[in-house]
Image: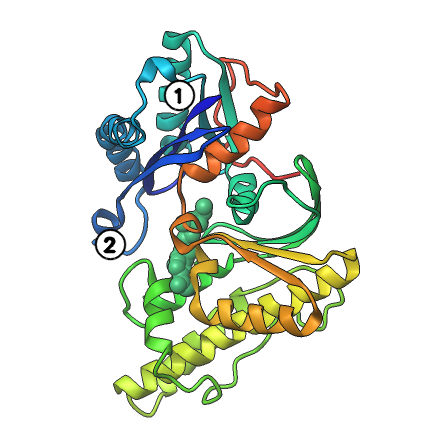
């Protein structure tokens, strides 16, 4: 079985080719970050037009790198949601058109499921685990019992963690997306210099809230003694530490409560170096196995969409060609 998968839910135009036997054959991503940076964030209409312009080329490159002709593809998949409506419709429509033209099955895939299962990408089976999906659009904890068997344990009540990174960065005048920039600046900073709130740490559930932390940074900024490199680095490190502490603590609590031995962390924020270090240390101490996708498969990509598609194909869970985009699609 050979799958062509497309991802266009936000500002990455991506295509991947996966084979049930040989695994991932190609994963191509055309990032629009440079285009949106001028606006300080993603502009939906601009994103949509960029997808339209680049999708064909990204598909051709993925097929070329995989050494596969379009006629050899057995199924075509694309992200159906959640995401920006005008972005989703480009990838989904292209996938439907290709499936129809080739006379092959079509699969509409949930973007959150793609992220969540990406840590299992290099393994064989999807094992019982607690999944933390932490990206620009989502922050949620899920109990995973197997493919398609998910139970939501908790999610953010306001901003996603990545959104908090990006908004705080914007307040500080950092370029979009600020997550990787804050990560980089924090390497030279003191995470203890500013005492930021660890919201909902004692809430007794698995919900998150990051908007209070963002407000704390907003109020602190005008009171800073200076804007030296050192102070900015300390501010970044202190903010990052607060986010990471909450993510690590809630994830370990969830693993304990759900009785799971594996922790699977995914989404763009899982690229964060401090989160990787602290999550690894906490899991080691608690006797848990940590799985995180490589950074290249943590931010938006089509390989994770193809991975879910292969699992659906195996179970004959196909989609109809009338399936529409679902901008507010939930995991469960
Ligand atoms: O998964 P993703 O590409 O898109 C969504 O589905 O949202 O995640 C993008 C988010 C952005 O908010 C970005 O700032 C954040 O992931 N991000 C990071 C890092 N790399 C990406 N946040 C913190 N540290 C990083 N190293
Ligand atoms: Zn994503």
| Residue 22 place in picture, x, y as percent | 45, 32
Instruction: Name the residue: 45% across, 11% down.
Output: 104
| Residue 126 place in picture, x, y as percent | 63, 42
| Sequence order check, earlier mark of 1 and 2 | 2
User: Is residue 295 placed above or below 240 in the rendered structure?
Assistant: above
Q: In this view of the protein, which residue sits in the foreground, 85 or 81? A: 81
Is label 2 within 8 A of ligand 1 (CB to nearest ligand atom)? no
Residue carrying label 1: 95
Res 135 seen here:
yes
User: Is residue 73 placed above or below 130 in the rendered structure?
Assistant: above
| Residue 170 place in picture, x, y as percent | 33, 65
Image quadrant, ligand 1: bottom left
Instruction: Name the residue: 52% across, 18% down.
Output: 323
- Label 1 SS: helix
| Residue 68 place in picture, x, y as percent | 32, 23
Instruction: Name the residue: 64% across, 23% down.
Output: 315
- Label 2 SS: helix
User: Is residue 34 placed above or below 7 in the rendered structure?
Assistant: below
Q: Which mark, residue 176?
A: none
Residue 171 vs residue 56: left or right?
Answer: right
Measure how far apart labels 1 and 2 are at the Cα level. Answer: 28 Å
Is label 1 within 8 A of ligand 2 (CB to nearest ligand atom)? no
Quarter of the figure that contains the C terminus: top right
Residue 162 vs residue 315: left or right?
Answer: left
Hey, which quadrant is residue 331 in on the image?
top right
Q: Which mark, residue 37?
A: 2
Residue 138 vs residue 150: left or right?
Answer: left
Estimate how packed mark 1 is, as few (under 14), some (14 to 19) or many (20 or more) residues with alpha carbons within 10 Å.
many
- State if disc 2 and disc 1 touch (CB < 8 Å): no
């Amino acid at each position: 079985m050979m799958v062509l998968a497309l991802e266009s839910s936000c500002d990455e135009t991506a295509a991947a080719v996966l084979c049930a036997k040989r695994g991932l054959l190609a994963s191509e991503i055309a990032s629009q970050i440079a285009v949106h940076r001028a606006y300080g964030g993603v502009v939906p209409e601009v994103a949509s037009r960029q997808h339209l312009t680049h999708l064909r080329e990204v598909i051709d490159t993925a097929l070329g790198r995989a050494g596969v002709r379009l006629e050899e593809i057995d199924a075509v998949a694309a992200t159906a949601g959640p995401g920006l409506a005008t972005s989703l419709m480009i990838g989904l429509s292209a996938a439907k058109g290709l499936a129809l033209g080739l006379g092959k099955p079509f699969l509409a895939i949930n973007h959150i499921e793609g992220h969540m299962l990406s840590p299992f990408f290099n393994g064989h089976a999807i094992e019982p685990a607690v999944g933390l999906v932490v990206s620009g659009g989502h922050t949620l904890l899920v109990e995973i019992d197997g493919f398609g068997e998910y139970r939501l344990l908790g999610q953010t009540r306001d901003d996603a963690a990545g959104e908090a990174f990006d908004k705080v960065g914007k307040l500080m005048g950092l370029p979009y997306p600020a997550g990787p920039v804050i990560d980089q600046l924090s390497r030279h900073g003191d995470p203890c210099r500013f005492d930021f709130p660890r919201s909902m740490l004692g809430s007794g559930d698995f919900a998150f809230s990051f908007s209070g932390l963002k407000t704390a940074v907003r109020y602190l900024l005008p009171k800073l003694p200076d804007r030296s490199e050192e102070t900015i680095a300390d501010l970044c490190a202190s903010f990052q530490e607060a986010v990471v502490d909450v993510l690590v603590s809630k994830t370990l609590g969830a693993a304990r409560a759900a009785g799971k031995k594996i922790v699977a962390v995914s989404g763009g924020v899982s690229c964060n170096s401090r989160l990787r270090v602290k999550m690894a240390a906490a899991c080691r101490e608690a006797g848990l196995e940590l799985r995180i996708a490589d950074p290249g498969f943590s931010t938006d990509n089509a390989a994770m969409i193809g991975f879910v598609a292969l699992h659906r194909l195996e179970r004959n869970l196909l989609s109809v060609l009338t399936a529409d985009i679902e901008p507010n699609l939930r995991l469960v």
